[in-house]
Structures are given as C-alpha cells and as structure tokens.
Image (cartoon, coloured by chain):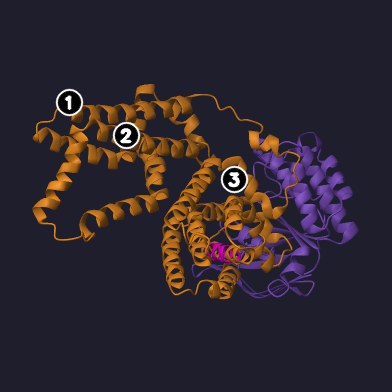
Chain colours: A purple, B orange
Amino acid sequence: MLRFHNFIKSYNSRKIVEIGELELSNGIYWLKGINGSGKSTLLKSICGFLHFDGEIFLNEVNLKRDGVDYRKKINFADAEPIYPEFLTGNEMIKLFLKAKSGSITKAEYYINSMDMGNYLNNPLGTYSSGMLKKLSLVLAFLGNPTLICLDEPLITIDIDSLSVLYQWIKDKHEKENTGFILSSHQPFDLSILNNVITLSLENGKLYPSS
Amino acid sequence: MTEILKKIFANGFFKMHAGALLFLFSTLIIYFFFINTFGTVPMWAVTEWNLAITLALVSSPLVLIIYFIVCLGYGFKSWQYVVKQLSIANNEFLFYSTTSFRKYIQFKSWFLVQFKIFLPLWIYTIFATVIGLIYGYYLLPICIVLFLAFLNAFIAYSYIQRINSLVHKRATTVAGSLTKKWAKPFFILFTYLVLDKMKLTFLITKIVSYLFIICISLFFTETAKEFSIGTLTIIILITAHAIIIYKEYGFNERFLYFSHNFPYSKIKMFLGPCLNYLVLLFPEILWLVTTQRFDHSSRIILLGLSILLLYRSIMYAIGNNMKRFLFWIFLIFNVLFLGFLYALTWYSVPIILIISYLIFSRNYSNEHLSD
C-alpha cells in the first residue's frame, strides 16, 4: 500500500503536485494527465529519485527515513531510458540483479519472452530506442518489488512486445500481488488488464477514480 | 540556418569554455596591468614593451610560428567540440535539414560559425595586422590573415564533409573490446567511461599531474620527501583533476540516473566513487607510496580523497555549472592552501569529510533535475 502525507513537489517554489492525504492499495493504476502535468515528476518522487516535501510510505516503510528498505520494494522504468553506451544489455541486467537481489531464472524468463537474447551481448550504444525500452522494462521487473512504476510503457515498443508486457503486468499482479502505476497517454488493452484504476493528475492534484 | 548553427555551436563553445577563457583573459589582464615589477617602470616603457610584443608577431617568423601553433591548437579544440556536438541526439536533425541546402550556402553558414568561434583570434590578428601595417611590416601581417582565413575555411569545410557523409556507427570501441570480459561493478563504471570516451582528457590531466610532480622534485630536491610537501602536492593534484570530477557528475546524473532507485544507502553512494578515483589516481598514488614514508603516504592519500569528495559534493549542490564549479574550486583551493601554510590541512580531514557528507546528503536527490 502506498500512502502520501502532505506531499508537495515543487520546482523553484512553483508547485507541481500536491497530495494531502491519500492511500492507494496494491492495484494497477493508470496515471493520466496532459503533457507537463507532472506525471513523470510524481513517479520519480514516488520511486526515490527526486526530493519533495512531506512523506511517502510503501507498506508503512518511510522513503525518507528508511530509503534502502523502501527502494528494495519499488522499481521504475523511465519513459526514455538512458544507460551507459559502453555496457551491454547483459551487464545492465547483472547490475540490476545484484542491486535488487533478483534471480537469474526470472530474468531469463523476461528476456526470452521479449525475444531479446540475440542482442543482449552488444553494447547499448548500438540499441534502437525500442530495444532500450524493452531492456528498461525487463530491469523494472527484476527483484521482488511491491510496486512497479512504469513511465509511458507503451511507447516505442512493437505490438507483439506490448501484449507480452500486458501479460507480465497481469501475472505479476495476480501471482505476487505487485502493484503498478503506469503513466500513459494511450489507453490500455482492457481485455487483458480489466481491473485498471484511473488516477487523474489535473492542476497539480491527484484524483483517483475506478 | 546560420543563426541556429551559431546558437548551437559558437555560443555553446563559449559557454562550455567560459571558465578557461575567463581564466586566460583575467590572467592576461592581471599580467599586463596589475603585476608589480621589481623597481619602477615608466608608463612609456610599459606601452613600448606591449607594442614590441605585438610587433614581434608581425616581424619575427619565430613568434609568428608560435602564434600559428596557438591558432592550430584553438582550431583543433573547437573542431573537436563541434564534432562531438554533432554526434549528440539533440543535434541529429541537422543531418537531415541543413544538408538540403546547396553546398556553398552550407559553407557560408559553417564559415560564419567558425568565424564566431575564432572571434578572439580574429580580433587579435586584425589588431596586430593594423599595428604591423602602420609600422611598415607588410608580408607577415598578410600571411597571418591568410593563414587564419584558410584555417577558418578548412575547418568549415571539414564540418560540411562530416555532416553530408553517411554515419558509420561502430559496434564497439577498442577499449570496449579489450574490457569486454571484465567485471563491471557499479562503483567503477566511470573508470570504464574514461577508458572508452575520455582518453584525451585523462591523458592531459595525467600530463599536468606529472609535470607538477616533476616540478616539485626539481624545486624541492632536499625536502621533496617531507610530509608538508606531499600535502601541498596532493592538494594541487586533486585540484588538477577537477575536470574529471565535473565529468563524473555529468555521467552519474545522466547515464547512471537509474541508480537513484537502487537500495544503496547515502553513505555508500557518497564513499563508493572513491573506488573509481583510487584506480584513476593510481599513477599519483604510486608516486606518493614510492617517495613518502608509508604512514605519511596513507595520510596524504586520505587527505586527497577527502578533498576529492568535497569537490564532488559541491557538484551535487550547484549542478552541472562549470562557472560556479570553478569559483568553488578556486575558493576551496585557497582555503586549503591557507591551511597548508599554517600546517592545519591534515587536521582538517575529519571536518572536510563531515562537510562533504552533509552537502552530499542534502543535495543527492537534487533539484537540478526535472522530468
């Protein structure tokens, strides 16, 4: 469960997002909002990237007080991932497996289901944006997260990979009770993800609605 | 097109090298106007000497050759900057937009871009040429102007060649192939970047470092092995690595940004990069270990790492801003130097470490990044 307490994220004293008190259960959330509404900022704040005022708790673990424990429980995939060009995909996966205490068996499952095996030994500088995006999604699923935040997960990847991603989300949620916050401008395929809860970010306020 | 290119490349070049140019400019100003000479120098003599220096450029072939070398060095540096900027994703649009203009229009634009980059050289060249012509020197002033115009045109032409040719992206670099099977732990990734992309910067830093070490050995032949000299050396050596620290911050915040989500404590993120620097400073550490007593060298290395961590933390507080970084480096260097004069530097190590950690801790999830 994700809980906000007097959360305020500002840039140069300009408030971007303000959430007084809010509790979100372990569901699949679709974070909606127009360009510049603060979706990425909110996700990066939740995932421990950006400084903010107030508190965020994940299963009552405080991000500011117990940052290490909190970050073990939460994973993130960026909208446009950037990684060191000299590393290979395999080296990135090893790095994340170590940091997030993930299992190689699970990693292999994700790699194979996205059909990524044939290029993971190449340096990331040679990857297309779609290949990088798929890698970032694999990395976000490694370890044992309670919550996974995916920023624009539907962009740049091909249609086949999209259905694989939907299946990953569905399985992870149903089998391991992992929560998701997905920011996207495109609607999700509700035939696979039929229990999506909408979170609307408007004028810096978050409005949950089923 | 010219205005866009000028904005991206010429303005970018001056912005990026503002610190170095400002340093050079202020050094020249201080040298010419504020240095107190031994004894009294009448005003007419100062004017005459400065005139003589300028006239030497248009009358002495040797000085002319030195000036040509300076121009070539400046030209190479600017060419390197523009080529690097052309390869970044933000400027990719230039490959499929500017190339649709006729070649002579492209040449005119790139010539003007390079002209703006060369502006300091052009101003000085024209000034020296006018002085030369007034004093009756004709051949060398014309040579200087022609040389600079040729260099300007040649570099502009090389940009056109590059932007109109098909991009050949290599799958891997030589360093990448050599280190392919090596383990790449998180806290040593910057060292791999240095091997892969920053070889020249690293080499120049090491040359500066070792030049200083040679100077110390020559000037302090009797006392070179003393602890105080080791302390002074490490302060200067770490300061000479400021550009590496600046680049490391940029690398961390751009390419290792994902690590903000790693379950690593702040103290681990604060101290972890020392691993990188122990590898990168290996030549200097080797010199210290071989010239100083063991206990002295360990203390000096610890002092070096604490100064380095302070410089790193400053980056987290101010963000990717070279001018402000140079200002802080200058300030801290002077404070450390004062500490050295009063033999307090070693005792300030715990204070430096605490201050560094506090700055890092407060600014690690910094405000300089936006979504």
Q: Earlier in the sequence, mark 3 or mark 2?
A: 2
Of circles 2 and 1, which is in front? 1
Residue placed under numbered mark 2 in the picture: B112
Q: Are marks 3 and 2 on the same chain?
A: yes
Chain of residue at mark 2: B
Task: Report crowding for label 2: few under 14, some 14 to 19, many 20 or more residues within 10 A (C-alpha).
Answer: many
Q: Three-letter amino acid code at disc 2? A: Leu
Q: Amino acid at mark 3?
A: Val
Residue B139 is tagged as 1
Q: Which contiguous range is marked in magenta?
A: B302-311
Q: Quadrant of residue B35?
A: bottom left
Q: Nearer the viewer, mark 3 or mark 2?
A: 3
Check disc 1 and report its element: helix, strand or loop: helix
Q: In front here: B70 or B187?
A: B70
Question: What is the chain identity of the residue bearing mark 1?
Answer: B
Which of the pair B196/B279 is nearer the observer?
B279
Q: CA distance from mark 2 to mark 1?
A: 26 Å
Q: Residue at x 72, y 65 (%)?
A: A209
**Residue B194's disc number:** 3
Can see residue B138? yes
Marks 3 & 2, CB-CB < 8 Å contact: no
Q: Give neighbour class at mark 3: few <14, some 14-19, many 20+ (Cα, 10 Å).
A: some
